[in-house]
Structure formats: C-alpha cells, structure tokens
Image (cartoon, rainbow, N blue to C red):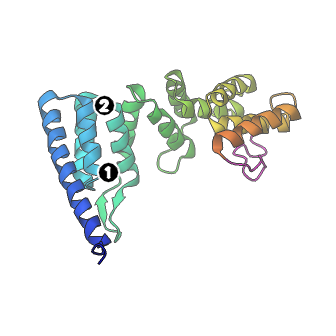
Amino acid sequence: MGDKEVNTETVQQEFKKIQDDYYKSLLVEMKDDCDTYKKATECHEYAKMMTNYFKRFQEGLDAYIENCYQRKAGQSCHNAAISLLKGVHDQDGSVIIERDVERSLDMLKLACTGNYPKSCAALSRLLQYGKLVPKDYSKAFEYLNIGCDNNNTESCFGLANAYIQGMGTKQDPGKAVELLEQGCSNGFAKSCHNLAVLYYQGSGVKKDLNKFKEYNKKAQLFRGQTSPVTMENNPLKEGSLPP
C-alpha cells in the first residue's frame, strides 16, 4: 500500500498555528524591547506587527501615535496619519478607527519636517487637491521643497509639476525639466513620462521627438510596460502647461 493520503487542510492549519505561535512570541519580544529600550525602531516594528499581522488596528495605531509623539519617529507618524486620514473599517463595514483629518495633518507635518520626507509628498497632495482640507498651493510648494531637499523622489516630482503649472510659485519650465531629469535618472517612471510629454508637446522646452522617444522608452522600462505615452494616460493635461 502507498503512503497515507496527506490532508492538505490539516497541514495548512498546523502550519498556521506554528506561524501564529512564532509571531505571538516575537510580538512579546518586540513589546519588551520597546518598553525597555524606548528605541523608535523597536517600537515602530511592534506597532507594525500589531497592525499588519494581527490586525489589531486600534492597538497598533496607539503604538504608532505614542512612538510618533514621544520618540519623534517619522515613519510611525506617517503610518498613524494615513490610518487616521482614511479611517479603518471591518469587512462588514463597521468602523474600527474613525477618520480624524486634523490629527492626521498634524502627524504628517511632524514627519515631513522631521525625518520622514515621504510624508511631505502626501501632505502636499492633500493641500493641492483640497478635498479634505482647504487648498493651499503655497504651503504645498513649501512641503514639496522640504521633501525634495531630503531626497524624496515623489516630492521632487511634485515640485517639478508645481513649476510647470505655477502652483504656489512662478512657472519655471527650466527648473521643472532639471528636477524631472534627476527623477528619471533615478529610475522614477513618472518623471520620465512627463519629460517625454514635454518634449513631445514642446512645452517649456524645444520640441524634440528624439528626446520624446528616449524618455518614453525609459518610462516604459521603469514601469515594466510597453504602452506609449498618450494624451489619455498623460498626467500633464492639455491647457495646464506653459506656452
């Protein structure tokens, strides 16, 4: 007779139990390290584990917020801010964490002006779109500068678009192209894409179809896509560019 038939469901359940036991033990160690050494990294990882693996969202949020305010941990500020900005809901639609835009903004500002420039890009988008907070292009431009000065590629991309459209600053196509070229050279597909559009349209730069093809090809490469730049998928809409 052959080997007994393996019950796949039973094996999966046993593996899940072993995995859960391991992570529970790890969580206790993380909490002890956070309480003992008061280091931002250990406390952030504890909050992250609580949120992402155990789905104990309120406890994870509380840990992020404590780490944000007590230890000036930028990434914890950012994660807490995003949870509060969106709110958290259970599968049945019930509210786990209420949306709190004002508190979210406070923590995004702390992270942006502290040690987590990724928050600068998120903050600027909120101020530019004006859906949850009043529009403030000048403030958005200020935060984009902070993020870009701290080497956040998304912030530099947003700053380039601000220079193109004159949002919170005077239009400066030359500065925009410089920032987009930096982003593209760092492998940021959206920067390559916008450069391709500018050279295709001749907006702020001399029209150059060879450069259009060059940057379009780079955008495709960095995105892992093959579709060309078109006006339909172009984030730089007609009428928003300088003449």
Residue 58 vs residue 33, the one in the foreground: 33
Residue 120 x %, y %: 48, 33
Dominant SS in magenta: loop
Q: What element carries label 1?
A: helix
Label 1 environment density (alpha carbons within 10 Å; few <14, some 14–19, many ≥20): few
Instruction: Please tell me whether residue 184 is drawn above or below residue 56 in the rendered image.
Output: above
Image quadrant in which the C terminus is located? top right
The amino acid beneath tag 1 is Asn
Instruction: Identify the image quadrant of residue 90.
Output: bottom left
Seen from this angle, which residue lies furthest front?
1
Asked if residue 185 can be seen in this view, the reply is: yes
Magenta-colored stretch includes residue 232:
yes
Instruction: Identify the image quadrant of residue 95.
Output: bottom left
Residue 13 x %, y %: 25, 66
N-term mark: 2 or 1: 1
Residue 210 x %, y %: 86, 32
Magenta part of the chain? 225-243
Left or right placement of residue 228 versus residue 235 in this view:
right
Q: Which of marks 2 and 1 is in front?
A: 1
Q: How far apart are marks 2 and 1 (CA)?
A: 18 Å
- The residue carrying mark 1 is 52
- The residue carrying mark 2 is 73
Instruction: Please tell me whether residue 111 is drawn above or below residue 12 in the rendered image.
Output: above
Residue 16 vs residue 235, the one in the foreground: 16
Image quadrant in which the N terminus is located? bottom left
Residue 197 vs residue 107, the one in the foreground: 197
The amino acid beneath tag 2 is Ala
